[in-house]
Structure formats: structure tokens, C-alpha cells
Amino acid sequence: MRDVAVIGVGLTKFGEIWDRSFRQLIVEAGSKAILDAGIEGKDIDAMYVGSMSSGRFIGQEHVGALVADASGFYNLHIPSTRVEGACASGGLAVRQGYLSVASGVNDIVVIGGIEKMNDVAGTSATETLATAADQEWEAFFGATFPGLYAFIATRHMHEYGTTKEQLAQVAVKNHANGALNPYAQYQKEIKLEHAINATMVAYPLGLLDCSPVTDGSAAVVLCSAERAKEFTDTPVKIIGAGQASDSLALHGRRDITTLDATVHAAQMAYKQAKVTSKDIQLAEVHDCFTIAEICAIEDLGFVKKGDGGKAIDNNITTRDGSQPVNTSGGLKAKGHPVGATGVAQIIEIVLQLQGRAEKRQIPDARIGLAHNVGGSGATCTVHIMEGM
Amino acid sequence: MRDVAVIGVGLTKFGEIWDRSFRQLIVEAGSKAILDAGIEGKDIDAMYVGSMSSGRFIGQEHVGALVADASGFYNLHIPSTRVEGACASGGLAVRQGYLSVASGVNDIVVIGGIEKMNDVAGTSATETLATAADQEWEAFFGATFPGLYAFIATRHMHEYGTTKEQLAQVAVKNHANGALNPYAQYQKEIKLEHAINATMVAYPLGLLDCSPVTDGSAAVVLCSAERAKEFTDTPVKIIGAGQASDSLALHGRRDITTLDATVHAAQMAYKQAKVTSKDIQLAEVHDCFTIAEICAIEDLGFVKKGDGGKAIDNNITTRDGSQPVNTSGGLKAKGHPVGATGVAQIIEIVLQLQGRAEKRQIPDARIGLAHNVGGSGATCTVHIMEGM
């Protein structure tokens, strides 16, 4: 396998976007990424698209071909493949594109992630998101994701003494970061008391413990590392890529406070990258709920199991902490267009490693990690990146 | 890239299956493939699942993880990825699995295809299938696939003098083949007069010109060719793999009687396999409608453009013809569980090349081709296989 680098990135603003369609959003993100890389359509060997539920949200499956078409590339007949793994669809799409370049099959690949979750017909976002859970054992009986993550949170509180205030602090931190991100859905800080006292959704998770319903798209261009400097002075190498699965339903897990898919995907990525968790200088982790960030930093090995809540108290994961987490604002404040999220996480790490993260720049960042989760943890991808 | 071989195959019976669920079907197909290959769960490096619209049909996205879980492999945390490209989802899944082994990333990969289209809630099969068309330009205005393929058929009749009788002959041939396939949905012959006089769906396509709504699953196990003989005496090598895209809507095509995605995917596969269309001894082509088989044999180069109808008159594509097509019964008689179809096509070619096709065996078959199409032709995969 050969080395692979990110040579271009593109993002739409995340939020409730009522005036642009699914295809307009992904074409915007893709065009920005292509311009950023300085390539043209004829340079592209393949495209991958991550989208969780375009079929239910907008009545459109077959979005690989849609994107190749809407981009104006249909006359080039570029192979274009949609990949789905619930909220990890973006991470999976990056992984497939990465593997296709690492293998030498393709030289230049564009990967897009997209979800249009507002202004949709015939279904609610919550109901469609629940199709990422086990339909027969969870969703059918009324379980939705706030409820499933509430199970995880109460168990974590019981086992490790994690507090509702610590959960709230994750939201406060991520909103503070999102306030500095012009692409974020919520560019405003929140106060701890508001997070603690927000409308209850599923105890202990209040409204400000939950990521929002978001429209948005993100795209990256990958290239073999040997050719990357033809396109940009600051390519970012993908030095480790991991993927793992777990039981779809929460009841199948060994321990519901541990996402074994994260543990295994991280081990795969660390091993390939020849680094340990201590070498990771910043990370974007999958904070669909505040408790998810606490579990993630434990499962990725940033802190030991059970210490995720204390890490927040100790400011380890703030922008001036020893391992900043979710400098973009995370899913919580940046927003969570589910198919786009995994791609957008990669973009934040790339911008940080390139020194392009503006007001939220972490000085001298060299190695970063992106962690994307599907459902309550049945799919996970981890990518580790290093500036070249 | 290294050579890749199919070392195991598994199929469920295709049809209206009211007594088994989505997960039961794919576990059945996958278990059969794994047993056929003589491997165990711990041997599997990755899984790929092709499914078009599990989200709409059964309210379940995230079916990559579902399949790893339902197979009993969740404790192995095997990376499992769902791939979607409408009715080409199965072919795309095989292609992704193939690339991952060809690249050396994985040694042994299991690929499943699945669709459960009967006994579904809240949507009709026709409405969900229309999400493979362009929602904004076609489906929203009421276009469904019989109508779109009727456009193709009437244009082909106008340009090349193709007749309704020739269309009907495709159905008669494929039912004659399906009658010999114990896994086919319709194991019975039909008469030409019945095909010609069947209830009209969208002129010139009558009921017997259309593939049915089908439940079913198919799975294959791929392995590096160098290790294939550890598992089976009769591995079948994939010697060429192509994929291409085209405009999602029919109105974007250069010529609606030509599927340029087929032309480009076939060129890619022929080039890699170092063969021409003349070397293909038998093929499974995507006959979602009878006209689609006529276009396919032209676009694959078996006959020259416009001669697809005459090829049927001349018995070129019957089991005793020079290039037998759809010996399995094709989508028409075997059935068309959309996500499973591309995988099932590969299985028919493998069985033929292994001499395991029983009553429908083509003697001395050595090189075969599988051709899978998404929608009205916006996605196409072509795989060329050779016995080892």
C-alpha cells in the first residue's frame, strides 16, 4: 500500500438551509474541494459519496450517480459509489476512497459527504435517524438515539461517578469552539447553567447535550502522497485508517459505556500510523451527545476508562488543553448533517495541520485524529493525519 | 494489484418470501457462501453489503453493521460496509470487495447483496424503486421505471426496427432458463403469445417484459488468487472489473438506446482482462426489462448497435447459442431483489465456470461476464471471470 494525502477540502455552511437542495449543497462542497486542490474533472479517477438516508429524507437513492451528474461530470463517466453506515457514512466513504488510492487503483479521488435533514417530506428526522439503530429490537419499540445514549450516560454516571455538570461542560466547550467557526450551525457560546438546566430530552441528556438536525455537505480530494506536492504546498498525509463494527443494538454490547468499535478501529489506525494515543495532538470525535465525547476520549485512549468526565473538569480537551478535542465545535455546535460529519471532521484536522484554522488554530499541530461513529457504536472509523 | 478469486457462493431462493426477514435472508446466503468456501468467521477481514433501499423498505439503514451482527460476528468487530447504487448495489459491493483484496488490504472478504421488497411498510415497491431515478426531474413528475424503459424501447423500435415480438422472445428465453433454476422466482416456461399479449404496463412493455418484485439474498467469498486453492479446487478468477456512471435522468443521455455507463464499464473490464467481447462465452446481463437485455448485448459488444433484436431471432443468446445470456433466468425469471441481483449474477457465472450449473450447464464454459445496471443506466458494473 502506498501513502495517501489530502490535497483539497470544501465545506458548506452547516445549519438549517432552506434555500438550497441536496444536489446544490454537495456540488458546492465538491467544487470548493476541487478548486482547493487545483484539479479538474478529467483528473478524477473515482468519487465516493457518504450519505445516511437520502432515500428517506429526500426520496433519492442512487446518489453516487447523482453527484457525478450534478457536478457536471456525467460525460466523463467517472465511477461514483455511495457508501452508508449511518452517522459514520462520511468516515466510511473517506476510508473507501483512501483504500482505492492506497492500493494504486486510483490516483485522485473526490469524496463527498452530505445530508439534507430539514425541509424533507413524509418522515421526521428523529424517526429516520432511528433507522441507524436496530429496527427489530430497538427502533420498533420506540427507542430513539437520545434514549439510547441516555442509557449509556446513566450507566457511565453509575460506574464512574460522571456528573450532569461534566456532560454540560462538554457542550460549553464545544460551543466555545463553534463560536469561532464560520461554518458552524451555532456560532455562539453557551453558559454552564443553561446547559445544565436545558429542557430535558432523555435523562440525563437535556437539549444542549444533543447535536442538532443539520443540512450540510463536506468534500475532500485524496491523491497519492508522492504526487501531492504537485497540487498543494501543504498536503496532509493519512498515516492510519481503521474501521470496526459491533452489535447493532445496545443490548449486545460487552459494556455499554465502551464502544468496542472505537477501541478496535483506533488500534488498527494507531498500529498502521506507528503512533500511540499520546502522540495525538488534537482530535475531532463523534459527540452526537455530550456523553459520546466522554466515552470517545476514553475509548481512543486519551484518558483511562472512567476518567472522561474528569478530563473535562481538568480542561484537558479545551483549545488550550493538552489534547484539544472538537476544535470545530464538534457535532454539538458545528452541527451534524449525518452523512457529511465524518468528512467534515477530516477537514477540521486538515485545516488545523495546515495552519488554516484561523481563530481556532492550535499552534504547531502536527498529528491529528478524526473519529466517526454510526448509530450507538455499531460502526466506527478512525483516521490519523500528519502534515507533510 | 494482485489477482482475486471467488472461493465460495451462497444464494437464497428468490421470490415472495413472507416467512423470513431481511436479516434471516442475508444470514442464510452468507452462511452458505462461508460453508462453500470452508472458512470461519475469524478468517474474514472485511464484509461489504449491497442493498438499495433497506431504509425505505424495512426502516433499517446501517445494514453493514446489521449483517456483521446478525451473522454472529459482532465480537470479531469485522469492518462491514454497505454500498448503494440502486439496482447496481450488488455489483458495486462486489467491486469494492474486489478492490480491497486486489490491493492487498484484505485477504478474505465476504460480500452480500440483499433486498426485501415484499411485506414492507409505508411505501410501495414501485415508489421506492423510483428513487433510483432522478427524483427532481423524473420521479417527482410520476415517472417510474416501466415508463422510463418504455421510452428506451420505443426509441429502439423507431431507430432499429426492433419489434414487440423480439422483446417477448427475450422473456420466453429467460423463462426457459429460469425453469431449470431451483433458486428462480418463476420456474416455468411461458409462451410467446402470452408474452406478447400480457397486460400492458407501459407501451411497448407488457407485464411479461418486466422483472418482478422479489425478496432474496446472495453472497460470495473473495480471496487472493494465490491462496484460492487452499479453499476450493475450482476457484474462479475475476480477471476484469469495470465501473462507470452516466447522467441520472434519461434526458441527459447522448442516445437513450445506448447505456454509455455499460460501454465504459465494459471497456475498462475488457482492457484489464485482456479479452474482447468475442471471448465472452456466456453472460448474465441486467434484464430488468426485456429491452434492457437487447441494449446490454449491444453495449457490451456481443452484437453491433441495433442488432440486439435480431440476435434474439437468430438464437445467439439461447443456451445453445454462440453467446448464451442469462442462463440463470435473468432478472426476468430468476427475480430481481435489487441489492442482491449484482451478486447473484456473479454467482451464476461462477457456477457455470465451475460446472455446477446442473440442468442449465453450458458445456466447457471458461470465460463469463456479469453486467449490473443501476436505474435507467446511471451506474454500471462489469465483472469478467475465468475458471482457474
Image (spheres, coloured by chain):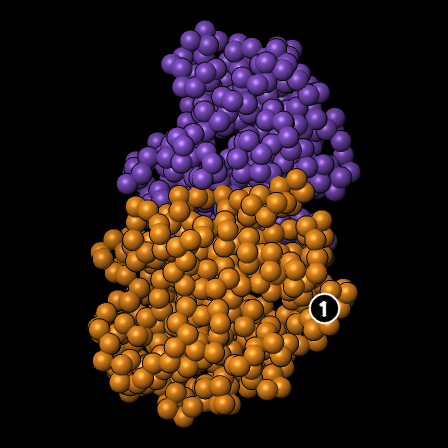
Chain colours: A orange, B purple
Q: Nearer the viewer, residue B131 or A172?
A: A172
Q: How many marks?
A: 1
| Spot occupied by residue B154 in the image (x, y as percentages of width and height) | 54, 17
Which residue is depicted at the point 68% across and 37% down? B264
Q: Quadrant of residue A374?
A: bottom left
Which residue is depicted at the point 22% across and 56% down? A141
Q: Which residue is label 1 attached to?
A: A232
Which residue is depicted at the point 71% across and 20% down? B304
Q: Quadrant of the N terminus of chain A?
A: bottom right
Placement of B344 over or under A13, stated as above or below: above
| Spot occupied by residue A162 in the image (x, y as percentages of width and height) | 30, 85
Placement of A21 over or under A273, stated as above or below: above
Q: Residues within 10 Å of mark 1 (few under 14, many from 20)?
A: some
Q: Quadrant of residue B57?
A: top left
- Of all chains, the one bearing label 1 is A
Residue A8 visible, this angle: yes
Question: Identity of the amino acid at label 1?
Answer: Thr
Placement of B106 over or under A353, stated as above or below: above
| Spot occupied by residue A94 in the image (x, y as percentages of width and height) | 57, 61
Residue B362 visible, this angle: no
Q: Nearer the viewer, residue B260 or B42?
A: B260
Which residue is depicted at the point 45% across and 6% down? B193
Q: Quadrant of the C terminus of chain A?
A: bottom right
| Spot occupied by residue B296 in the image (x, y as percentages of width and height) | 61, 26
